[in-house]
Image (cartoon, rainbow, N blue to C red):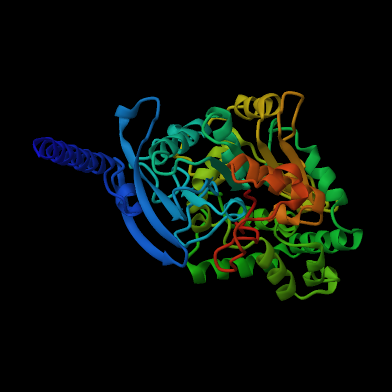
């Protein structure tokens, strides 16, 4: 009996120890709800949570240093959104390179891997702007360091593999992030990302506009553009009334005349960036006999007459600052327009940033990234559109690249994606994304043609169209 009692006592003590250990483990693990775990991250705060079937969607604010090299020099609040699927799934890190959308959405790689998505607002786009704004802290390394710090903060929660992605300036951003922090991501999917290595050499754009689409379509666009300059006087009178009615001003660019020409010279570029060859039917067929209303409406629809007003430029000051300090900006020629009709030509980014903000171009920044991609790209996929002018200067791979690809979607514009590739490339790209994310099935690993997105298409959630930005911006 005593042995039995001693055994029961020992068992009780043992079970009590297990219970204590379990309680201690639970205490150490902290909260279990994803929102509570997000808000337990130092510097993270909730702006709002929005419901979406099958997900939880959070709009958050995260404290970042203004200068990652000197964290003591102040902080600012950077907006983040989290589309939470499951902590066991891969995570896609998205940035558009501009403001972050606070509406739930799912980028193509997120659908392909059926994962979580973290989206980050680019620094200095309001409200993610330090106050006061030290513009010298706006560069590609600082922005990449923002991403790195967010990744480090969220990695304990989302422990699976991460992929970086973005379109246009966001594709550039994903590429720069990989260049500076190549150990963070398992792969990068960069859409329509320009690579302006030598800022003053832009002949690739002229070659593009000489051959894009069909001759008939090019002739229509060129004629409307020229006619808008021929009718400069009456259309500028209309522009002045339009500006007065809407409270628009032109202090930054230096006057209504400069703004008018900038809008008109963006016309052909804007058409190919956002439209398809089938849309050429919307362009006036005979510009010379078209009414002023027809010319105005066509230019306004494509380029947007508000783009170069102070009010149109202000939200994009961070982009123009970067274009004039590191990213570079294209310049093209207009052989179909007599020289006397063009007064300013493509204006430099300096003209679109208030003069109170100092700017100095750094030619080595893009050369460094381009060289790194050519020699060190690993698990990187670049997707371009055949008819997108921004793809004229693109990233290319060298002998040092490993498991990396550059694909072109036929007939597509600035909204090119994996779904628009030819079948063999689409299957290969999808298979590589799944493999990099660690969720490729044995069948896909053996045969890429079996690759399909793991999540069903959701018309509300999945973003497939081009993200339209007025004026000449990637």
Q: Is residue 66 left or right of residue 219?
A: left
Closer to the camera in the image, 139 or 465: 465
Residue 169 visible, this angle: no
- Please give the count of numbered marks on the rendered protein: 0
Residue furthest out toward the left: 2
Residue 29 image point, x, y percent:
28, 41
Q: Is residue 58 left or right of residue 169?
A: left
Residue furthest out toward the right: 215
Above or below — where is 354 with respect to 217? Answer: above
Above or below — where is 3 with respect to 390? Answer: above
Res 164 → quadrant? top right
Residue 458 visible, this angle: yes
Question: In the rendered image, which quarter contains the N terminus?
Answer: top left
Residue 284 image point, x, y percent:
80, 71
Q: Is residue 137 left or right of residue 24?
A: right
Residue 222 image point, x, y percent:
82, 59
- Identify the residue at image location x=65%, y=58%: 466
- Identify the residue at image location x=46%, y=67%: 53
Above or below — where is 343 with respect to 405? Answer: below
């Amino acid at each position: 009996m005593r042995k039995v009692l001693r055994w029961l006592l020992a068992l009780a003590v043992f079970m009590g120890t297990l219970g204590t250990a379990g309680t201690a483990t639970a205490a150490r693990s902290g909260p279990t709800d994803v929102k509570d775990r997000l808000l337990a991250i130092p510097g993270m705060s909730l702006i709002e949570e929005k419901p979406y079937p099958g997900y939880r969607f959070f709009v958050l604010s995260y404290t970042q240093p203004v200068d990652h090299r000197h964290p003591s020099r102040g902080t600012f609040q950077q907006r983040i959104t989290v589309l939470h699927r499951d902590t066991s799934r891969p995570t896609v890190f998205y940035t558009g390179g501009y403001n972050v959308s606070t509406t739930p959405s799912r980028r193509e790689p997120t659908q392909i891997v059926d994962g979580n998505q973290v989206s980050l607002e680019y620094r200095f786009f309001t409200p993610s702007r330090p106050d006061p704004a030290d513009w010298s802290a706006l560069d590609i390394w600082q922005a990449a360091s923002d991403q790195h710090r967010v990744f480090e903060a969220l990695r304990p929660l989302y422990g699976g593999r991460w992929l970086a992605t973005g379109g246009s300036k966001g594709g550039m951003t994903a590429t720069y992030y990989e260049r500076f922090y190549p150990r963070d991501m398992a792969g990068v999917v960069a859409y329509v990302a320009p690579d302006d290595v030598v800022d003053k050499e832009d002949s690739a754009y002229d070659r593009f506009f000489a051959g894009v689409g069909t001759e008939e379509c090019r002739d229509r666009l060129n004629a409307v553009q020229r006619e808008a300059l021929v009718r400069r006087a009456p259309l500028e009178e209309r522009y002045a009334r339009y500006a007065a009615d809407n409270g628009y001003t032109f202090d930054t660019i230096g006057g209504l005349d400069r703004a008018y020409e900038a809008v008109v010279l963006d016309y052909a570029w804007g058409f190919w960036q956002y439209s398809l060859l089938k849309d050429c039917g919307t362009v006036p067929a005979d510009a010379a006999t078209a009414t002023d209303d027809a010319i105005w409406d066509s230019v306004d629809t494509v380029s947007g007459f508000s783009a170069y007003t102070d009010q149109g430029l202000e939200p994009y000051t961070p982009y123009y600052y970067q274009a004039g300090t590191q990213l570079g900006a294209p310049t093209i020629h207009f052989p179909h327009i007599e020289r006397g009709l063009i007064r300013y030509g493509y204006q430099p980014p300096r003209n679109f940033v208030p003069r109170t903000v100092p700017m100095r171009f750094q030619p080595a920044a893009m050369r460094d990234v381009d060289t790194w991609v050519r020699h060190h790209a690993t698990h990187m996929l670049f997707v371009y559109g055949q008819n997108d002018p921004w793809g004229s200067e693109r990233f290319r791979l060298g002998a040092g690249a490993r498991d990396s690809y550059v694909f072109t979607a036929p007939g597509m514009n600035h909204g090119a994606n994996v779904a628009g590739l030819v079948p063999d490339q689409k299957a290969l790209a999808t298979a590589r994304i799944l493999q990099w994310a660690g969720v490729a099935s044995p069948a896909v690993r053996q045969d890429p043609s079996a690759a399909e997105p793991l999540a069903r298409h959701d018309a509300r959630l999945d973003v497939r169209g081009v993200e339209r930005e007025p004026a000449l911006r990637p």
